[in-house]
Every structure is written in C-alpha cells, then in structure tokens.
Image (spheres, rainbow, N blue to C red):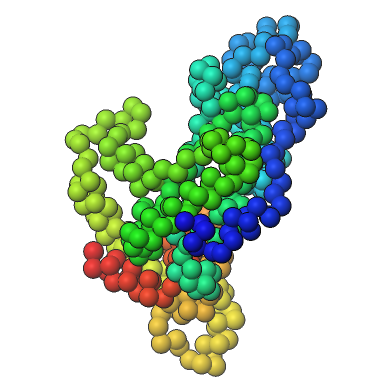
Amino acid sequence: MIENTVPNTRQALADIEVPGPYMPLSEPFKSGRSLPEKISWAQAPNGLKTYLVNRYGEGISARNIDVTPEVTAYYLLDYLSGRPGQIRRGGSNRKGGSYRTQEYDEVLIDRMSESIKDGSPVPILISSFSPKLRNESITGGNLMPDMANYLAFINLHSIIAGSRKIYKPGTEINVGYEGRLYRALGRYSDRTIESTLNILNQLNSTAAERIHNSPNDNPIKLIDAADLVKECLIDHSLPGEELPQMLTENKFVKRLRVDTRDVKTRYETAKEEVNRYIESHVEENVPELERRKKIQGEPESSWYDFLRDHDALLPVLSSTLKTINANQGNSGVVYNHLAEQLDFLGQLESWMLFYRGTMSTDMISILVVKITAV
C-alpha cells in the first residue's frame, strides 16, 4: 500500500502542484468552444484540407466540411501530436520539428475514426514502468516506484483530460507494465514485480482522481507487457503473414538462441576485421592514442579493446565509417564490407554501453556468462 511505503504519502502527493488538464492549442477549442456541425473550408487547418482532398478529391473544397468522425479524428491527432515535451517527445529530425507525414496521418485517422464512430474512447497503447534499475548511482538501490512515476501518471491523465475537450469520450491509455518482461534482465523477484505493480496502480488511481475529480473515472489501465509480447510474437502472425507452423514458446526460445549465436559470431568476426583496420591506421584515426603508444608502448589488449577501455571506441568507429562512406566511390568491395561491419559494431557497442551504464557490475558479469554459454 502507498500508506505503508512512505509516511504521509497521500498528503505529500496532494500537496504537489500539477499543471492540470492540457488544453488543445487549436481553434475552436483554444477559445473554449466545441466543434460545430460544419466547418468552412477557409477555416479548416491545412493538414485537414490535405487529408480530405486525398480522400475525397478536389471537389470537397467547394463546400463546407461536415464534422465527420474522420474530421474529429484529425483534430484529436493534431492535439496528441502537439505540445513538444508534454504530450509528444520534443525534437525531431524532420523539417519543422514534426515526425508526421501524409501517410502517417491517414493511417492513424482511419484507425481512430473507428472508435469515434462507435462513440467509444480512442485506445492508445504504450509500454512503460518496471522496477527500478539496480545501479545505485541511478536509483540509490531503491527498486520501488517514486515521485517520477506519479508525475508520469499525472501527465498521462492530463493528456486524456485535454482529449475530452475535442471528443467527449476522449482517449484511454493501456500501459504495458514491463516488470515481468524484464525479470531476467533486472533479476527481479516475483515479490518485487508484484509490489511495484501494486504501488503503480495506487499512484495511477491517485493521479486519476486528482485530474478527473472522480474516484471512479480512471481511463488508464496497467496490463502485462510480457503477455502482449508473447501474443504478438508467438500466438499471432502479422496481418498478411502466414507462419509455416504454430510458433510455440519453446520454438521461439530456440530460434532466439540461434539468433544470439549468429549475432555473437558476427560480432567476433567484425571486431577482428575492424581491429586490423584500426591497427593499420592508428595515426590517422586516433592520433592522440598514437602519441600515447609512443610513450607507453603497444597496448596489452587489442586496439579495439584499448579504445573501448578508454571510452574512445564509439567516436573512432563513427569517424572511420564517415571516412569510408565519403570515399565510397573510390572504395572496392572490401571497404563496402568494412563499412557494414563498422555500422553493425557501432549499433551493438552503443547498446552495450547503455546497459553498462544502467546496470550494476554483477548484472553485467552474469549476462556475459549467459551469452558466452549459449
């Protein structure tokens, strides 16, 4: 229970200042009004015009627009795609800071329209929340949920409250709880997984009552992400895909072991090839380490491992890949292959660096032993 976890926790949560429901930034909602039955073409957002013309042809621009489920879905999508840093993650590589495309809009509007036609909340699925990482420098060794989890629920409920300003049933969010999914990675006990889930459910209920002003209005549900993954990867094929035979869990695990061996073999091969290239190009690729070599002599380990031990591997892999790609026209098959190996190692080493930074030392050693034994 929350009350048994931290003294006066409920009062502490009640004392926190929260932003409250997010308001849509577009008209007519910005002025506190609802969608009318019709919208003039001149007042319609450009994105909505593009969607309607693509769907119904140029003739639709000659009249007012009926507020159909598709139109409502557009405004809802526009709201859910806004407020960088609050609703969607801030920043983007796309021009204008938006990840949206015409194809993206059309697919999601069609899906959201189905719920709107039925007058039901638009479902959203996210995956989040698990016991904390064991790295004491990050969590202080405390695996249980904290204030950040509560504020995350506050933010999600604020998003839902804002969606109800556009479409009365609003949205509902199903959160895939990752505790059991990451059981092996975090070495979590059943008790830790269940205790975390119980506290998260109570934080969710407290946040819901705070935002929606009702103890019975909670549009966020926590479900088991492990069951979702099992259902997607094992129990069902993708639309249009027919599996040659029923993929049982045992068969999936066996296939995963084969894939793990393949990745390990490619990693060792790529590491050896890239190490040879680095050793033959030390002066041009890592001049500061070449100077160190003259003073200290050859490294006891390979240059590849030496660079990793000195936190210089990823920059060297990146700069080497850029050099090879820049000279792609003058490079033969060997250099094309080397570029692929550099890209592969860069991705794999990035993930390994991430896990080394978020897990404790003993967890890393256990994982290495397990992978080596596969």
| Residue 178 percent location from the top left of the image | 42, 51
Q: Nearer the viewer, residue 44 or 194?
A: 194
Total marks placed: 0
Look at the image and tell me whether residue 154 can be seen. yes
| Residue 164 percent location from the top left of the image | 64, 29
The residue sitting at 50% across, 17% down in the picture is 118
Check the image and report above or below for 91 versus 121: below
| Residue 45 percent location from the top left of the image | 73, 23
Q: Is residue 130 left or right of residue 57?
A: left
Q: Nearer the viewer, residue 168 or 7?
A: 7
Q: Quadrant of the rendered structure where residue 304 is?
A: bottom left
The residue sitting at 41% across, 87% down in the picture is 300
| Residue 131 percent location from the top left of the image | 44, 60
Check the image and report above or below for 356 versus 253: below
The residue sitting at 52% across, 58% down in the picture is 3
Q: Quadrant of the rendered structure where residue 322 is?
A: bottom right
Look at the image and tell me whether residue 88 can be seen. no
The residue sitting at 46% across, 65% down in the picture is 143
Q: Nearer the viewer, residue 342 or 357?
A: 357
Quadrant containing the C terminus is: bottom left
Q: Nearer the viewer, residue 326 or 331?
A: 326
